[in-house]
Image (cartoon, grey):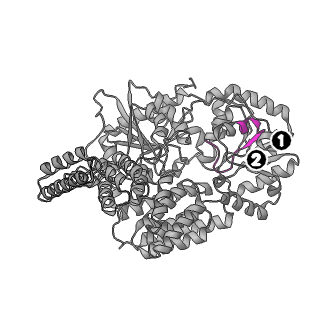
Amino acid sequence: MSAKKSGKAAAQAEALLQRAVGLHQAGRLDEAESLYRDLLRAQPGLVAASHNLGALALQRGQAAAALPHLARALAGMPGRPEYRRTAAHALQLLLEAKQFAQAESGARALLEADAEFAAAWKTLALALRAQGRDALAAWGEAVRRLPQDVNALVAHGLALRDAHRYDEALARLEGALALAPASAEVHYNRGKVLSLMGREADALAALGEASRLQPGNVEFELAHALALPTTPVDRDEMRAWRRRFETGLARLEAEAALAAAPPPDNIPNIFYLAYHNEDDRALLERLSRLVRRRVPALNCVAAGDAAGRAADGRIRVGFLSECFVAGHTLSKLYEGFLRRLDRARFEVVAIHAMRWAPWWSRQPLSAAADRALTLPDDLPGMQAAVAAEGLDVLFYTDIGMTPTSWLLAHARLAPVQAVGWGHPITSGIDTLDYFVSADAIEPPGAEAHYSERLIRLRRLPCHYVPLLAPTRIPDRRSMGLPEGATLYGCPQSLFKFHPDFDAVLAAIAAGDPDGRIVLLEGAQPEPSARLRARWAKSAPILNERVLFLPRLPLDGFMALMAHIDVLLDPPHFGSGNTLYEAMVYGTPIVTWPGRFARGRIVAAAYRQMGVADAPVAATLDGYAPLALVLGRDAARRAALRAELRERAPALFGDLGAVRELEKFFEAAVAAARRGDKLPSGWMPPDENTKATT
């Protein structure tokens, strides 16, 4: 085409574009759209027409439809501010409408056209996070282009925190603090990361500043007043922290004039109370009452009675957790129940209370149920979603490990509400009717430890699917283990190492000079560093004789189980999942049943297995001598290992436990329909149920 004709065509196109713009501005959208499309058929590269088509779709409330047009416009003119503003508005509308999949696909299309489009990176990160997918890389790209965006810096810091990259998370949050020194949210999140790093004094200062800057924020107040360390402390420090917790709770209880607050995203880290070997019922009941008063939205009561709503007459049971993800201990402990409850009598719903987990990791528990439900992000939405299920029984597998289930449990959403032993300590919440435990793990008078009515099943409350043992086990040398030494192992989370355990470990180390005690490092170096510092004062021999291995994947962990000669059950809060993993190889576990159920599980397992001469110490002082006797006698260990492997089927795939849980559900629902509850200490009828697979 000649230059003259080309110029004439361009002029005609410009004239038509201006006419289309005039129609657009006059509100004659159909005519404007038709003309824009005619122009693009004639000149596909006319990016202004593409942009205006996108803007027109936005006027019609069609944000998803607008984005392909806007992506074409940006592909033609990357970085043009006007086009980016329109596209950013479209993305924002999708986020506000919670159309996260469309926001993600739209952001990706825009980034293909304009890779430096910061708002698209930020939207991509938000959409991925909302869908429970990994947003860490997207936040990194957003922050690189938005170094002054405080919200993006905080979000990237929290994503790094969730990836256990605490040093990097802290750096991001301190960058945000430099930009917004008066931001209570930044101080609060910085304090939470510092706490995870074991820097308690710095954490308290940051949490205190957050509470000062935003008085009346219940989340900030609770975090500061009720902080607990996440790493092991000695006895004096432990007592001091508990006194501080009680004093802070009393101060908040006394502030009766404080205004009602919206639901917090988090609760104080009460998880660590359970590891102090104290009866925490009174503290947890007081905390629950305080938060009920400050956050009225927690006190939701579902309309009507859900009992008997199932059309076919079956009891409808919902199992709820934030931890129903592949490989998590809670999934291992409860998947069998979801899968094996009698479907002629029960309908089973798996309720996922945390969206962050990838969909595929939730799939095993979802597949085990008749129906799966993933809760929305906001508390009223969660309450409504659970209430809409019309459950007869709402069963929380754990309370106190994570925030969402603790907050949600304050509502009455089903006629029967119970909690299981996923975190084996009372909740202190009066809307939970029952705590489902086992008679064998509870000491006499244990009913007093629970705000709930205690249910004593006759078998351990677990249908654990047996693990497949690795067929190829690396030798000791390749795993960094000493050859020829007796290996005493305690591959547990380091927050289980109560100061009372130090003397036991030191006695084992002194009594077997050729032995080694094998532990696992934590996700971060701070817990093991703190433990070593404690041992330098309480038991210096341990810093010479303890071997720390890096964290291991499951196959590596199981190989370690095969090599360990004697497993050591931590006093006061012992093994749960590790018990089942050890029994795959019959690895003997020395234990001492303590004051509370959480320290009595291994001893109960031995009784269920029928092990006559199990290595169960009568006293804590007798623990180390018993471990040393077993460690020095290879023949006895071999015989015990063989016996444990033979008797392990009494723990795995236990349909007897399933039948007992069914009896509890039926009895509890029947009582609820009478307007009553089962008595504390209730046990299912003794029908000599035995482990069957």
As drawn, 413 above or below 365: below
Q: Residues within 10 Å of mark 1 (few under 14, many from 20)?
A: many
Image position, residue 599 (x, y; %)? 63, 47
Q: Secondary structure at mark 2?
A: strand
Residue pictured at 69% horizontal, 39% vertical: 556
| Residue position marked by numbered label 1 in the rendering | 486
Q: Amino acid at mark 2?
A: Val
Total labels: the figure holds: 2
Q: Judge whether residue 464 is colored magenta.
A: no
**Residue 496 at x, y percent in the picture:** 65, 52
Q: Which residue is mark 2?
A: 518
At horizontal 80% and vertical 34% (from top left) the residue drawn is 637
Task: Find out whether residue 561 is within the magenta segment.
Answer: yes
Q: Residue at x 65, y 34 (%)?
A: 607
Q: Which residues are magenta?
A: 559-576
Residue 375's tag is: none
User: Could you tell me which secondary element the residue under label 1 belongs to?
Assistant: loop
